[in-house]
Image (spheres, helix red, strand yellow):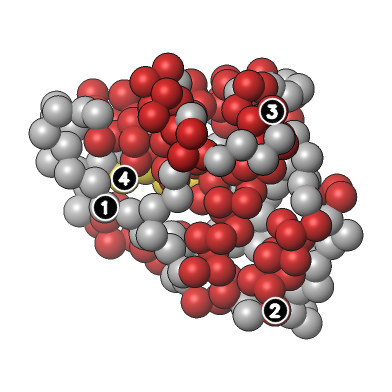
Amino acid sequence: VETVGELLKEGVSENEWWNYLEVVYPELAWYMTIPPLDSLLQEYFLSYTRSRLCDRAEKQLFEQAKQIAAGQLLWKFRLRDEVLERYKRRGVPVLWADGMGVEWLGALLGSLNKLPKVGVEFEIARANLPTVTECNRGWESEEQVERGVDTEGHESPYPYALVSQLKAVCRLARRAGELLEYSEKVIITSDHGLTRFAKSSGGFRLPKGVES
């Protein structure tokens, strides 16, 4: 993680070392690979994942976040609970990841795609506001939730947090694979995401009447 961070800080083209990364640390390459999204979101998460590797946020990242906020992209996505409801009615098992936002989508997809005979689809949905666990908890037992992403994000320093969080995402994918031995489908979702640089962003204004 630190080596990749230094390469990024020095401005070394990713094309020069990407193939090596895919061999040495494929999970990190998955993390840095953002699947097709809205162009603003795509650019933001490409910047965000690289900022985490460098353990610093450039001004560009905050500008991108402000553009997303100004465009009110959040409100274009369906509520997560609305998306889940139709699957719950069919009895599809649901795995939760505490604190796993869109940042981890590439790592999750990469991990799932390594499982044999598994097809993967994803949909981005929005959490309930405020985005805290108390307002978004949907699991009934601890067996349904992976805590590693949230716990390590709050308690571990760079670069150990990122390494441990990647392990948690891969562990979640393996748990989904185990459930697929007994169920045709499995849903993986999260209560909310985490923002590493929230304290240095200066904050963003929410629509009137929305609690922060």
Please, what is the three-letter code of the amino acid marked with disc 4?
Ile
Q: Earlier in the sequence, mark 1 or mark 3?
A: 3
Please, what is the three-letter code of the amino acid marked with disc 1?
Glu
Side of 189 relative to 182 (left or right)? right
Q: Which residue is mark 1?
A: 121
Label 4 to label 2: alpha-carbon separation: 31 Å
Label 3 to label 2: alpha-carbon separation: 32 Å
Q: Earlier in the sequence, mark 2 or mark 1?
A: 2
Residue at disc 3, secondary structure: helix
Quarter of the picture containing the C terminus is bottom right
Residue at disc 2, secondary structure: helix
Quarter of the picture containing the N terminus is top right
Label 1 to label 3: alpha-carbon separation: 34 Å
Label 4 to label 1: alpha-carbon separation: 10 Å
Side of 72 relative to 191 (left or right)? right
Q: Position of residue 82 (x, y in %)?
A: 40, 66
Q: Earlier in the sequence, mark 3 or mark 2?
A: 3
Please, what is the three-letter code of the amino acid marked with disc 2?
Ala
Q: Position of residue 189 (x, y in %)?
A: 42, 46
At label 3, counting other C-alpha atoms closer than 10 Å, the crowd grade (few under 14, some 14-19, many 20 or more) is few
Q: Which residue is mark 2?
A: 70
Q: Position of residue 88 (x, y in %)?
A: 29, 52
Quarter of the image where one finds residue 202: bottom right
Q: Which residue is mark 4?
A: 187
Q: Is residue 191 visible?
A: no
Q: Which residue is mark 3?
A: 6
* Callout in the foreground (4, 1): 1
Q: Position of residue 33 (x, y in %)?
A: 44, 44
At label 2, counting other C-alpha atoms closer than 10 Å, the crowd grade (few under 14, some 14-19, many 20 or more) is few
